């Protein structure tokens, strides 16, 4: 059973930085994509950043140039470095993953592409 545990959320002022982490375990296959999603109160969940099984990345337009997704396959951890944070970045942030036995998984920002989800970590940015 795949388990994803996020950490690193918190409260910061506008312009500040945070780094989110997602510890993953339980994969049957070592070929997987991972992504970060967020959901603000009253809004739909949206894809923020994703990384494919070969290391390619994808970002939502709203975070390009400010957020960086990365992964450490040795410790099975996904990261999201968030710089120049804005109040509109305030949301619950979720880690998600999908794995396959063969082939490559491209980075995707659609929630439907991910069967495994963490519980989320709250990010609050004040102006």
Image: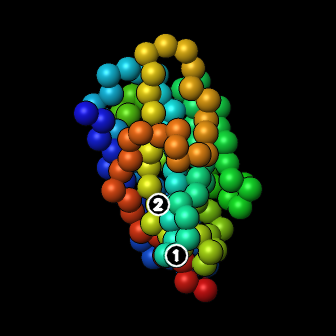
Identify the residue position indicated by label 2 in the image: 93
Q: Are marks 2 and 1 in contact (CB under 8 Å)?
A: no
Check disc 2 and report its element: helix, strand or loop: strand
Q: Residue at x 45, y 66 (%)?
A: 92
Residue situated in front as seen by the camera: 17 or 78: 78
Q: Position of residue 2 (x, y in %)?
A: 30, 35
User: Is residue 77 something that shows in the picture?
Assistant: no
> CA separation, marks 2 and 1?
14 Å
Residue situated in front as seen by the camera: 26 or 9: 26
Quarter the C terminus occupies: bottom right
User: Within 10 Å of the Cα at label 1, are there few (<14), some (14-19), or many (20+) other Cα atoms?
Assistant: few
Q: How many numbered marks appear?
A: 2
Q: Position of residue 65 (x, y in %)?
A: 73, 55
User: Is residue 75 something that shows in the picture?
Assistant: yes
Check disc 1 and report its element: helix, strand or loop: loop
Q: Which mark is residue 53?
A: none
Quarter the N terminus occupies: top left
Q: Which comes before the other along the chain, label 2 or label 1? A: 1
Q: Residue at x 60, y 54 (%)?
A: 48
Position of residue 30 in the picture relative to residue 58 (left or right) = left
Residue situated in front as seen by the camera: 104 or 17: 104
Image-quadrant location for residue 84: bottom right
Q: Residue at x 46, y 60 (%)?
A: 93
Q: Which mark is residue 42?
A: 1
Q: In front: mark 2 or mark 1?
A: 1
Classify 97 as above or below 82: above
């Amino acid at each position: 059973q795949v388990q994803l545990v996020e950490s690193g959320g918190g409260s910061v002022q506008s312009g500040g930085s945070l780094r989110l982490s997602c510890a993953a375990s339980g994969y049957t296959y070592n070929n997987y994509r991972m992504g970060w999603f967020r959901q603000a109160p009253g809004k739909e969940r949206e894809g923020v950043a994703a990384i494919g099984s070969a290391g390619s990345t994808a970002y939502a337009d709203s975070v390009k140039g400010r957020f960086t997704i990365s992964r450490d396959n040795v410790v099975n951890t996904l990261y999201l470095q968030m710089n120049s944070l804005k109040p509109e970045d305030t949301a619950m942030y979720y880690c998600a993953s999908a794995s396959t036995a063969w082939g490559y998984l491209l980075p995707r920002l659609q929630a439907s592409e991910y069967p495994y989800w963490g519980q989320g970590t709250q990010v609050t940015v004040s102006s």
